[in-house]
Image (cartoon, rainbow, N blue to C red):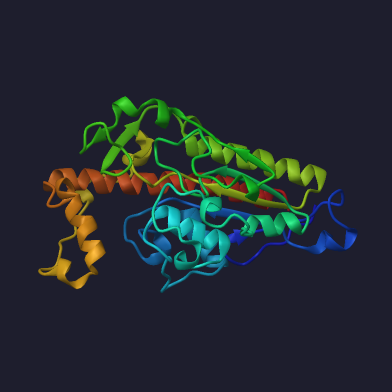
Amino acid sequence: MRIRKLPHFLAGLAVLAALVSAQAADRPNVLFLICDDLNTDLGCYGHPQVKSPNIDKLAARGVRFENAYCQYPLCGPSRASFMTGLYPDQTLIQTNGIFLRERLPNVKSMSQMFRDAGYFATRIGKIYHYNVPTHIGTSGHDDPYSWDYTINPRGRDKDDEDLIFTLTPGQFGGTLSWLAAEGTDEEQTDGISAAEAIEQLEKYAKHQTPFYLAVGLFRPHTPYVSPKNYFDLYPTDQITVPTEPEGYLDTIPEPARQSIRRKKDQIDLPNDLAKQAIQAYHASITFADTQLGHILDALDRLK
């Protein structure tokens, strides 16, 4: 099976005669990959410590944005925006917990447009908003009209919540929290997502199916959970805690200041605790990068 690729953070496979005409066989398919709460702590952006070889390789062969901004600094509005191509002022989604069709019952999402063009659209994991980790294993605030098929993986990271360290007792998603987990990658939700994605790619290749496959990883969103070996890559004695310039809060917009001040327990952390949080975040990045690597390796193998 010959596979064509899109030269961005999207990659493509080739196509299915059962759903579309023969002329469509030259169209690239789409592999849409997204992480949750991933910043620029990546090798391809010059971070001196973070190990992200798979994202780095993808960036080297695609397009790396140097000055990009999301449309809204909150998960639900941002995801609704890029899945519809509309500004948050147009979607009227400016908080989490709102289903897309509550505001825009007739909107066509990106994946719907691919469905209309004869592609088979599959979602694995988090594409629209989920409360993390509460909604892991469910459809969260997904849009069912966007997909032909969905998979909601759930791993031991969800089942081991009682083992997670958190700054806010009983809370894991909206606060600093982490766990150096026992077990293997394959037992974690994102490891399961990677395995499911590979299975779908193999199925599409076998049956010559034109596809739009969206894979949404949960890491590195809090809680920062990954197997212990990823934590071992980042010894805390090699981590430097960044300092906040004097008067920094006065330089950012008022909503951002309010957001920071609401999390008083996460401001001015003891140095040792801050190092642990950074270690856990970077471990989660490398764990997520590894899962993306498995998917991309499968894509290359199926050329």
- Depth check: give the residue in front, 19 or 300: 19
Q: Is residue 72 left or right of residue 30?
A: left
At x 45%, y 46%, the residue is 288
Numbered label tally: 0
Compared with residue 232, is residue 71 higher up or lower down, i.e. above or below?
below
Q: Please state the horizontal and vertical placement of residue 163, each as a whole percent of the image.
A: 30, 26
Res 68 quadrant in image: bottom left
Toward the right, the furthest residue is 22
Q: Can you see residue 71?
A: yes
Q: Please state the horizontal and vertical placement of residue 105, each as a whole percent of the image.
A: 59, 54
Q: Please state the horizontal and vertical placement of residue 254, each as a whole percent of the image.
A: 22, 67
- Depth check: give the residue in front, 162 or 109: 109
Q: Can you see residue 13?
A: no
At x 50%, y 45%, the residue is 126
- Depth check: give the residue in front, 71 or 289: 71
At x 40%, y 63%, the residue is 72
Q: Is residue 83 left or right of residue 173?
A: right
Q: Is residue 209 left or right of residue 55?
A: right
At x 42%, y 73%, the residue is 66
Q: Please state the horizontal and vertical placement of residue 150, each as a whole percent of the image.
A: 62, 40
